[in-house]
Amino acid sequence: MVKVALVSLFLCLASLAVPLVQADIKSYEFAEPEMAQRFVDLTTVLRCPKCQNQNLADSDSIIAKDLREQVQTLINTGQTNQQITEFMVQRYGNFILYDPPLNKATLVLWLAPIGMVLIGLWALWFFGRKTHVQGAMLSPSEQQKLDQLLAENRTPGRD
Amino acid sequence: MNTTTKRLLMLLPTLLAFTLGLFLYQGIGQDPNKMESSLIGLPLPKFNAQTLVSPSKNVTQADMLGQPALVNVWATWCPTCRAEHEFLLTIAKQENIRIYGVNYHDQRPAAQQWLQDLGDPYVFSVFDPKGVLGINLGVVGAPETYLIDAQGVVIDKLTGELNERTWPLLRSQYLTLLQETN
């Protein structure tokens, strides 16, 4: 009985969680509606430095809340998205970007997928070639036997 | 395909697995939360804020210059800060280390009480209840400790507890700075 009550309580709370987060974003005020959209965009692409797998919009940590307020203030004071992003990178490094720029430190990150595809293509070519080569390596007597078998089993009407 | 190539090819998965193993092995023991501070090599951000002890007294980054020092971000709600407090007191007293505090996202009475009860290792603590200075420093969460030189340039940063194990990392740099200053 207690278990059932606990489970239903948990379900109630869980169903509340998502609307609460959205309400949180709506509580930020902006001079123009277009700014509110920019706020949503920015807090989605900026990563929370504390809880590393969440963006600023998602996280409940103190620093994420501070940075949301900072984004709000910067938007309201007329800063562009690029200026705000630069502000964040200056303080928290490229880590804060979910979409990291291409530079020396991230080169491997960007090139690895291309490398993987190239290796895959090479493997396809390499192993594809293998069967072809083996097929061509039948001795003349084997080839003759094969032709004979194929001729015997050919169904009339097909081919 | 000849036998040698075939044998070599059979070794390939083992080789790949071994490489992956090496790669993963060197990651063991590394702190995934460790982030290089963007502030290293740059001067402290400008600020003008009240001290924790007196609302009528304002301090700026200029008040932290003159000697190499530590800037320690702390709060009464932070258990790790409580854990390292004793150690801060020790190095302030026994090693004569200058430590400035940044009281981060805290209540003034609670923070004042904390220093009264536990002792005050700080030259002064900047009162930063909204985390404004925190953002400009690139603070992720308390505790964090920055090593600055006499000109206020950030030399290194430690995320997490300052203790017997972590202090040597900053201490050697601190001593070098001290020699340069004198």
Image: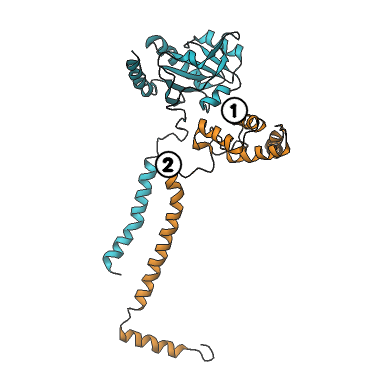
Give SS at disc 1.
Answer: helix
**Quadrant of residue B57 within the rendered picture:** top right
- The image shows residue B6, relative to residue B97, as above or below, that is below
Residue occupying image coordinates x 65% and y 37%: A39
Name the main secondary structure of what is drawn in magenta: loop
**Quadrant of residue B69 within the rendered picture:** top left
> Taking the image as drawn, is residue A93 in sight?
yes
Residue occupying image coordinates x 73% and y 36%: A32
Kindly identify which residue carries mark 2.
A105
Chain letter of disc 2 in the image: A
Kindly identify which residue carries mark 1.
A62
Range drawn in magenta = B41-45
Chain with colour orange in the figure: A
Tag 1: Cα neighbours inside 10 Å, few (<14), some, or many (≥20)? Answer: some
What is the three-letter code of the residue carrying label 1?
Answer: Ile
Residue B26 lies left or right of residue B54; in this view the side is left
**Picture coordinates of residue A120, whole percent (x, y):** 43, 60
- The image shows residue B21, relative to residue A3, as above or below, that is below
